[in-house]
Amino acid sequence: MVKKTDPVARIAALSEALAYHNYRYHVLASPLISDAEYDGLFRELQVLEAEYPDLARPDSPTQRVGGAVSEKFVKVRHPAPILSLSNAFSGDDLRAWYERIRRLDDRVEHASFVVEPKIDGLTVVLHYAEGWFARGATRGDGEVGEDITPNLRTVRSLPLRIPVPGNVKSGAVPPQAPKRLVVRGEAVIFTKDFETLNASRRAEGLETYVNPRNTASGALRQLDPKLTAARPISLLCYAIVEMDGERIGTQWEVLECLRAWGFPVASHVRRYTDIDAVVGYCAAQTGARELLPYETDGLVIKLDDLRLASDLGVVGKDPRGAIAYKFPAQEVSTVLLDIVANVGRTGVLTPNAVLEPVVVGGVTVRQATLHNFDYIAEKDIRLGDRVLIKRAGEVIPYVIGPIKGARTGRERRYRRPRKCPSCGQKIERAEGEVAYYCVNSACPAQLTRLAEHFAAVLDIVGFGEKLAIQLVGAGLVKDVGDVFRLTKGQLLELPGFAEKKAQNLIEAIAATRARLAAGGHLGRLISALGIRGVGEVMAGDLAEHFGTLDALTQATPADLQLVAGIGPSASQALADWFALPRNQELLAKLRGLGVWPTGERRKASAVADTLAGQTFVITGTLPNWSREQARAFVEAHGGKVTDSVSKKTSYLIVGAAPGSKLARAQSLGVPALDEAGLRRLGAGER
Ligand code: IVH
């Protein structure tokens, strides 16, 4: 993997490479390497740092979670007041603001305006000293905030180091930041990340979060940074609170500098030279807010000339040189017609509101989430109530609560179901959890959702919700193992299936089966089984720890708790799952089908470096692995994958339809291997 001769240089190179790829991924959203490659570099750095703890750098990407757990947050006085903004609700309000400041200072007449999204998150103040992220605080009352540095370090798009004179070691010298810099930004959870987070919580039987803003804010106030790290928090920066050296003249340049120094900055920023254009843009953006990947509640209009803005001064806590244009709230009221409970793949029942259709932000809404049954009781939501609903970004709207003043007396209290709405069997609530579950693991609704999940996790192309419903409905899938027993003949009898579609699906299933049979996908399979509380990460940890399904099935709850992150309830859920006869039958079926993968060993420390010092080049399409998977395999075993064949290439990995690399390898005498050969080599067989 790495020559141990120069760990200092290698650690520096890895830290810089990881910081750069992290920036490409989280700030620019334009990664240059695959996740597996990133993980490979990360692991290499972890191993080196474990070996040479003194060499670990404060900006090491492995150190994002590590700060001390504080008893309570220490107060931090901001270097300058963290001001707020006055609001405008219409074009007329904006014009009135313009007139006010024009009368105060005639330079306004020729001024430009920068218009930015008003990001609906938690304001944070980030201090950099000599290029290092030194401290981060909440806004607090605008004068004094709370020190949340260890939590902010876990935010992947927050640069831990920025280029200032003296700390730039390699490559082209980037534009340099001042040695002392305080930046203001907004911590948010992107809509997509929020939806993914809630989907996995729902599947694991955990309470879903109500909205991205509160989730981000709650996560950043955790006393344990590990809890913060588990939430997908992002950052967007928009102002410099303080810096040494010459002040930057315009807001436009501020944004450009922040971007150049590696800070994430909102795209969708405009500059206009007259107020009419600003008003026009604001009107146009009102309907386009959903196109942004995060929640916004308006736009911020700022005088571009920061000197002029500062000369105009402040009214109370609001600077005169900027104003927020608030979008109309995406909250509307409508009538709650009914509440239906949907059954998820782990049997969790989620209540959904059926609404009298209503238009919010240009979209007709008929359904909204009610989170869980406790939420309905806590908010005293009744059938027939006029309820307030909120739609934000792409998130499914949620019911904020009833408008109690509008009650007529005809509203009815809602009683949660006592039986599963799909199969009619008992429902139960696990101790300490909010969710109710259908106890029948053969419940058709559960099975349908599970089959869908199983196919998605295992990448069975063409296997979606509709097919899951058909297969479960037709009795062809009674457990997920049956997916591998489907025949073309059976598919052809289903409505909508012709020869080609059936053939494609059968092939996709066979490919997945071959992948699983080939080994190394244990974590995936565990995750696909949809065990309550066992998400992708935990499944990977289990695979790594136990190595085989045999070992896992025999584990006691105490054994399971030896795996980091598995507490008493998850270990009990796992043990319960394995103890169920139905699941034992499923496992026996999978074993009989050859779907019995071995564990991927993910930690470099646990992997045999069987490919250390060897260089591989891949050509053609491999039967089971994508290029990225093959590369990950090689790297996990200490080898390297490069793009072109040279005398130094140890092996050429050849798939179907190889390119010119094959001829070149042959002419250089480089041996060729197929995918299976590579796997054997990695496993230590020669
Ligand atoms: S500028 C003097 N720009 O909105 C500078 N604020 O309602 C004042 N906010 O407290 C802030 N996005 O936390 C500015 N692009 C943006 C913003 C933004 C969100 C927040 C900020 C402020 C609140 C005012």
Image: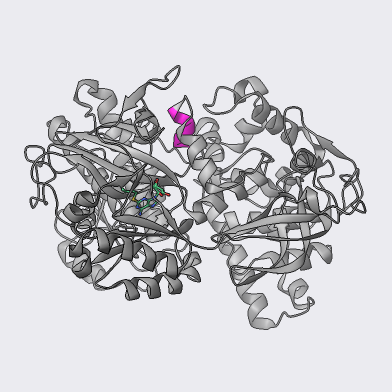
Left or right? Give the position of 415 relative to 406. right
Please determine whether, in this image, residue 591 is positioned above or below residue 99: above
Q: Position of residue 268 (x, y in %)?
A: 35, 65
**Residue 66: x, y in percent?**
36, 26
Specify the color scheme: one colour
Image position of 500 (left or right of 310):
right
| Residue drawn at 10 percent across, 42 percent down | 168
User: How many numbered callouts?
Assistant: 0
In this picture, which residue range is highlighted in magenta? 225-230
Q: From the viewer's side, name the closer residue of 329 and 455.
A: 329
Q: Residue at x 20, y 54 (%)?
A: 306
**On the picture, is 529 further left or further right than 127?**
right
View extreme (front): residue: 103
Please give the name of the residue rendered at 69% of the width and 40% of the height, measured from the top-left corner.
Answer: 205
Picture coordinates of residue 347, whole percent (x, y): 77, 46
Q: Is residue 226 magenta-colored?
A: yes
Q: Quadrant of the C terminus?
A: top left
Looking at the image, residue 95 sits to the left or right of residue 19; the answer is: right
Q: Which quadrant: the N terminus?
A: top left
